[in-house]
Amino acid sequence: MEFQSKEDIAAPIETVFAAVTDFAAFERQILRRGAEVRRLDSLPRPGAGMKWAATFQFRGRDRNVQLEITEYDPPHALRLGGESQGLGFAVAVDLMALSRNHTRMNVAAVIEPQSFTAKLLVQSLKLARGNLNRRFETRITEFAREIELRQTRGAKAPR
């Protein structure tokens, strides 16, 4: 099952990449939503090999997720891969500079069942595919607008 979204953002590619790789901010968001997250690696700076483990509730059950950065190519690409109880998933974020102050962000997420139970879960998710696609695209759009808002505020801030 695959989800895709494309957004044009009024910000330089470096600014967008910095927002996409603000892992501390993503960890805080996850914690605010009631999940537990912990870093598993000890890399001194962001890059391929960074790993996290998270636990959260989904459909009334605790779910455990392992997540790893598989590709880190500033400021153009970020790839993440992971697994959770029979589900494999991959997320790809590709950035392309359209001009000095505009960036196109392509985000693709793929979920692949690796067990019978996971196949049943993905099958039930396919029934709600339209709603899930809309929610995915809405989240990506909101994230893009946040980046633009931060860019605008930063440009107007006194120095």
Image (spheres, helix red, strand yellow):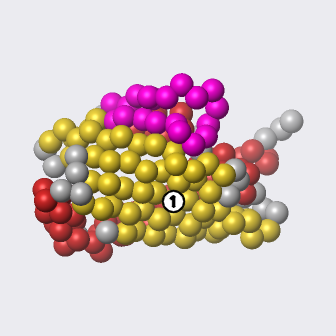
What residue is shown with label 1? 92
Helix, strand or loop for the magenta stretch, by majority: loop
Residue at x 62% of width, y 37% of height: 46
Query: Which residues, given as a range, are shown in magenta?
Result: 35-54
Residue 124 position in % (x across, y down): 16, 66
Seen in the image, is 104 located left or right of residue 134? right
Q: Find residue 6 and report its image quarter.
A: bottom right
Residue 67 in the image: x percent, y percent? 41, 43
The three-letter code of the residue at mark 1 reads Ala
The residue nearer to you, when weighing 151 against 86, is: 86
Residue 37 screen position, x and y as percent: 38, 31
Are there few (<14), some (14-19), or many (20+) residues within 10 Å of tag 1? Answer: some
Mark 1 lies on a secondary structure that is strand
- Left or right relative to 59: residue 101: right
Magenta run includes residue 134:
no
Question: Measuring 52% from the left and 37% from the top, which residue is drawn there?
Answer: 50
Asked whether the viewer can see residue 148, the reply is: no
The residue positioned 86% from the left and 36% from the top of the image is 159
Q: Is residue 32 left or right of residue 142?
A: left
Pinpoint residue 135: horizontal percent, then vertical percent: 36, 63
Whether residue 108 is visible here, answered yes or no, is: yes
- Left-right relation of 35 to 96: left
Query: Looking at the image, which is closer to me, 116 or 56?
Result: 116
